[in-house]
Image (cartoon, rainbow, N blue to C red):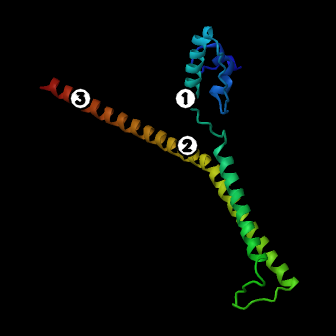
Amino acid sequence: DGKSKHVPYRDSKLTRLLQDSLGGNTKTVMVANMGPADWNYDESLSTLRYANRAKNIKNKPKINEDPKDAMLREFQEEIARLKEKLQGKSGGGGGSRRAGGSRSSGTGSERTVEKEKIVEVVKEVEVEKMVEVERVIEKPVEVERVVEVYRDVNVVKEVEVEKLVGMREEEVEAMRQQLIDQAERE
């Protein structure tokens, strides 16, 4: 509901009408209309002031995107760029450079082999990127596991400390009792 949102600009009917546009990730075009008559002078001046204030409002819209989705999109763009590079190398110039340093004649079977190699390289890159994305996605789970382990370790340490404190209290109580007994004998 647009009326429940607070827009920190001006409390007026026009601002209320425009609050969805002024407070969101949108661009708003405003036309200030004035009348040339003398009796409209005050209204025209007020309209110009309001239009000037509205013009000075700067919103910084941003894309509402999950960081994981953004990373996945970047990886897909990188894969597309790499595919284009590989296709540009295989399709450009009469003949390709082989590992032995000689130029091939560019027959159909050699081109097919090159295309298969390109497809393999692209698949490897895609697999690497997907593994990286999965690693990023699993990172919060790993952090949660580490926190849980530390929590368990802290609980064990607390139990050990409580046992030690209990033993020390018993020793102190025993010594106090010995002192009391010794004082009573004397």
Examine the rendered structure and indicate whether residue 61 appears above or below residue 131.
Answer: above
Whichever of labels 1 and 3 marks the residue nearer the N terminus, that label is 1
In screen coordinates, is 154 left or right of 17?
A: left
In front: mark 1 or mark 2? 1
Q: Quadrant of residue 6?
A: top right
Residue 119: image location, x then y, percent: 79, 71
Q: Nearer the viewer, mark 1 or mark 3?
A: 1
Judged by depth in the image, the label closer to the viewer, 2 or 3, is 2
Q: Position of residue 37 (x, y in %)?
A: 64, 12
Query: Could you classify mark 3 by the number of other residues whose Cα lies within 10 Å: few (under 14), some (14-19), or many (20 or more)?
Result: few
The residue positioned 69% from the left and 18% from the top of the image is: 17
Give, as a three-letter code, the residue at label 1. Answer: Asn
> Which residue is the site of mark 1?
56
| Picture residue at 39% right of the left edge, 39% below the top | 161
Q: Label 1 vs label 2: CA separation?
A: 51 Å
| Residue 9 in view, yes or no | no
Give the SS element for disc 1: loop
For the point 67% across and 42% down, the residue is: 65
Callout 3 secondary element = helix
Does 156 appear above or below 30?
below
**Label annotation for residue 148:** 2
Q: Which residue is mark 3?
A: 176
- The amino acid at mark 3 is Arg
Q: CA distance from mark 2 to mark 3?
A: 41 Å
Query: Would residue 41 be found to the left or right of residue 77 on screen?
Result: left
Circle 1 crowding by C-alpha within 10 Å: few under 14, some 14–19, many from 20: few
